[in-house]
Image (tube, rainbow, N blue to C red):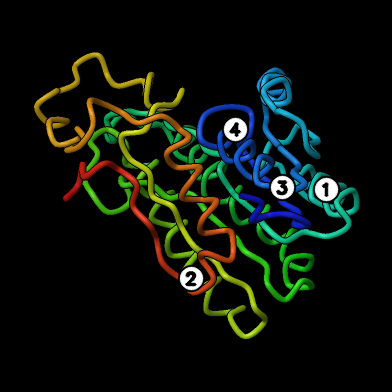
Amino acid sequence: MNRFEGRRALVTGAGSGIGRATALRLLEEGAAVVAADVSEAGLKETAARAGGGSLTTAVLDVSDEAGVGRVVEEAVSGLGGLDVLVNAAGILRSSHTHEMTLELWNTIIGVNLTGTFLVTRSALPALLATGRGVVVNFSSTSASFAHPYMAAYAASKGGIQSFTHALALEYSKQGLRAVCVAPGSIQSGMTSDPGLPQDTDWSLLAKLAPAIGEGFAPPETVAGVVAMLASDDGAFVTGTEIRVDGGTHM
């Protein structure tokens, strides 16, 4: 399939996990992709896995306003415009809420929620100029279902969902679509080591197992959904979230 032939995409969080899988999927389907991530080593690995096509990389901390403005401007200039933005950058940290420091809370909110806003804000003029721009944001099943020890993460992802709904309506008359993907039970660096407290009550996590398959799914499972939503196959989908969790939260 070449659903993205002639289309230009910026993917954050593309140095690992779902972000990397998404960048490679869009590239495979014909998109010209700028892959951004805070990890230079991760971006080199993403580039090494690319099987051809137009892929460039950019080191970016999405919580850095000045850095976001510079990288987005360079991406738009290099691509000659922008059709698709995928905000996959994010971090997961765990803690008892009563022990969470304000610094940790602000770090999680700053990367996940504020970072999504900063990149989207900078990219909007270019996306709107196409008349068919698409923003795919990353929420999480934690936004709608209880995930213990992850209050800040859940709050950031709930904020992203609300932000996406508002964005979709505000720019609907200008042809922009904004959708959310809410993954759960997906293999990634985040989920392999969420930093749970030493005294974790594992009975509270009993509901976090997928109903289908034999365990957590690979990142490519989500990348395929993102590709559908960002392509013309998703042309009538906006202002909503799509849960990809193998039935964990049925």
Q: Which residue is mark 2?
A: 238
Amino acid type shown at disc 3: Gly
Label 4 residue SS: helix
Task: Give the camera-side residue of 103 and 50.
Answer: 50
* Discs 3, 2 touching: Cβ within 8 Å: no
Q: Residues within 10 Å of mark 1 (few under 14, many from 20)?
A: many
Return the residue at label 1. 75
SS class of the residue under badge 3?
loop
Report the mark closest to the observer, 4 or 1.
Answer: 4
Point 43% across, 60% down: residue? 161
Give the CA distance from mark 3 to mark 1: 17 Å
N-terminal of the pair, mark 2 or mark 1, is 1
Tell me the crowding category of disc 3: few under 14, some 14 to 19, or many 20 or more residues within 10 angstroms, Cα based: many
The label nearer to you, 3 versus 4, is 3
Please say whether residue 76 is visible from this viewpoint. Answer: yes
Q: Would you identify the image quadrant in which residue 34 lies?
A: top right
What separation in Å lies between label 4 and label 1 (alpha carbons)? Answer: 17 Å
Question: Of the numbered discs in the image, which one, if any, rests on residue 30?
Answer: 3
- Looking at marks 2 and 4 on the same chain, the residue that comes earlier in the sequence is marked by 4
Q: Is residue 39 above or below residue 1?
A: above
The image shows residue 56 at horizontal and vertical percentages of 81, 36
Q: Please, what secondary structure does the residue beneath circle 2 have?
A: loop
Mark 4 highlights which residue? 20
Which circle's residue, 3 or 2, is located before the other in the chain?
Answer: 3
Determine whether, in the image, residue 87 is placed left or right of residue 126: left
Q: Nearer the viewer, mark 3 or mark 2?
A: 3
- The three-letter amino acid code for the residue at tag 2 is Thr
Please tell me whether residue 186 is drawn above or below residue 111 in the rendered image.
Answer: above
